[in-house]
């Protein structure tokens, strides 16, 4: 019997110890996934004449791949903490009673990225992948569309799993209607925004004591970038002359996203991504025909003084810190 992807699901749960599997805590609202077990089998070298290799034995096991979905208020703060890895500072009852603001930053250079278990129901079977860490995380929103995320992971192993009994996703997804992208020079008429967080995970490989499995990956120097497609307006030339052609960094680049769902009163679920000290790395404007003239710019957050290169401020109903 053949199966379709309809009815498949994905859950994630934060681990307390790397590689020790836990139950799912959040529904990923999955659109697709490509997580797989990687078995390294090496041929045994020999000079004995033979019609085929004498042996090809198992030397290592690990797992890797991607999963993607549409960002929901129920999983946004959780996923952003797994992607950034730093402390979540919570301002309770802010901006209103019953609504809480989570300020999530990137893990320090000496810190440890959080690990998690990913459970995937592919209908034929359910598999769990322990020791997952996010290598790259993208958040993308085209005008008039939902906000979508993709997480590329490195994991320890694969085993048979079970889904946790989680509440159905009932809140409305984040979308770009009413989204804004703001620079010190003004608001950009964005058509598409893509945030990329590259944690530069380092594979520490195997040791005698680790057996078939590699050790816990560690992060390197992160690359935090934003690519912006927009209509061509005066602000694009300002960014070009002020930031691209000089050493002057853009103090802040602020992307605000909202869900139509309300937490309390008139306070909606909201995400504000702030990149600081942004070095503009590319500016493009092009006339491709009689239609609208398009523009694009890209920037990378840099670490200057004590300023956080990135902060994700998530307003939701959860009072507990995601880093707890």
Image: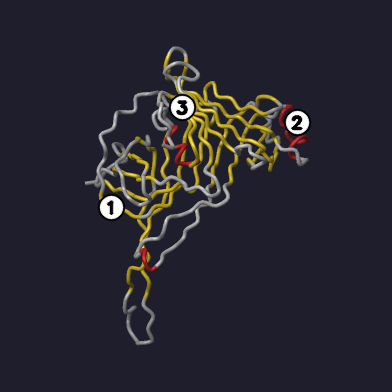
> Mark 3 vs mark 1: which is more N-terminal?
1
**Residue under the point 34% across and 49% down:** 129
Q: Seen in the image, is 229 located left or right of residue 207? A: right
> Where is 127 relative to 228, above or below?
below
The Cα–Cα distance between marks 3 and 2, rounded to whole angstroms, is 30 Å
**Residue under the point 55% across and 31% down:** 273
Which type of secondary structure does the marked residue at label 1 adopt? strand
Q: Nearer the viewer, residue 230 or 223?
A: 223
> Where is 154 relative to 243, above or below?
below
Which type of secondary structure does the marked residue at label 2 adopt? helix
Of badges 3 and 1, nearer the viewer stands: 1
The residue wearing badge 1 is 159
Which type of secondary structure does the marked residue at label 3 adopt? loop
The residue wearing badge 3 is 174
Q: Seen in the image, is 71 located left or right of residue 181? A: left
The Cα–Cα distance between marks 3 and 1, rounded to whole angstroms, is 33 Å
- Given the current orientation, which residue lies at the most extreme left position? 1
Disc number for residue 238: 2
Q: Nearer the viewer, residue 146 or 130?
A: 130
């Amino acid at each position: 019997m053949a199966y379709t992807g309809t009815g498949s699901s994905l859950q994630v749960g934060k681990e307390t110890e790397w590689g020790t599997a836990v139950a799912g805590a959040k529904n990923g609202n999955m659109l697709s996934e490509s997580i797989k077990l990687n078995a390294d089998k090496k041929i045994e070298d020999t000079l004995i004449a033979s019609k085929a290799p004498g042996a090809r034995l198992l030397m290592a096991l690990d797992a890797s791949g991607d999963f993607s979905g549409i960002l929901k208020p129920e999983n946004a703060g959780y996923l952003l903490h797994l992607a950034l890895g730093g402390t979540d500072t919570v301002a309770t009852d802010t901006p209103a009673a019953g609504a809480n603001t989570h300020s999530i930053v990137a893990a320090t250079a000496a810190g440890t990225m959080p690990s998690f278990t990913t459970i995937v129901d592919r209908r034929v079977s359910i598999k769990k992948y322990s020791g997952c860490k996010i290598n790259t995380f993208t958040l993308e929103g085209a005008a008039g569309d939902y906000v979508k995320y993709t997480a590329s992971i490195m994991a320890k192993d694969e085993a048979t799993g079970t889904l946790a009994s989680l509440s159905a996703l009932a809140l409305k997804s984040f979308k770009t209607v009413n989204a804004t992208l703001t620079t010190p020079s003004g608001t950009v008429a964005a058509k598409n925004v893509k945030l990329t967080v590259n944690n530069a995970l380092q594979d520490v490989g195997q040791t005698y004591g680790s057996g078939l499995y590699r050790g816990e990956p560690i992060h390197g120097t992160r690359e935090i970038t934003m690519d912006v497609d927009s209509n061509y307006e005066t602000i694009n030339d300002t960014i070009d002359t002020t930031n691209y052609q000089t050493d002057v960094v853009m103090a802040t680049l602020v992307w605000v996203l909202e869900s139509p769902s309300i937490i309390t009163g008139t306070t909606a679920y909201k995400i504000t991504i702030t990149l600081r000290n942004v070095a503009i790395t590319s500016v493009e404007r092009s006339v491709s025909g009689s239609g609208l003239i398009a523009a694009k710019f890209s920037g990378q957050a840099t670490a200057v003084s004590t300023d956080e290169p990135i902060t994700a401020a998530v307003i939701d109903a959860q009072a507990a810190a995601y880093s707890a």
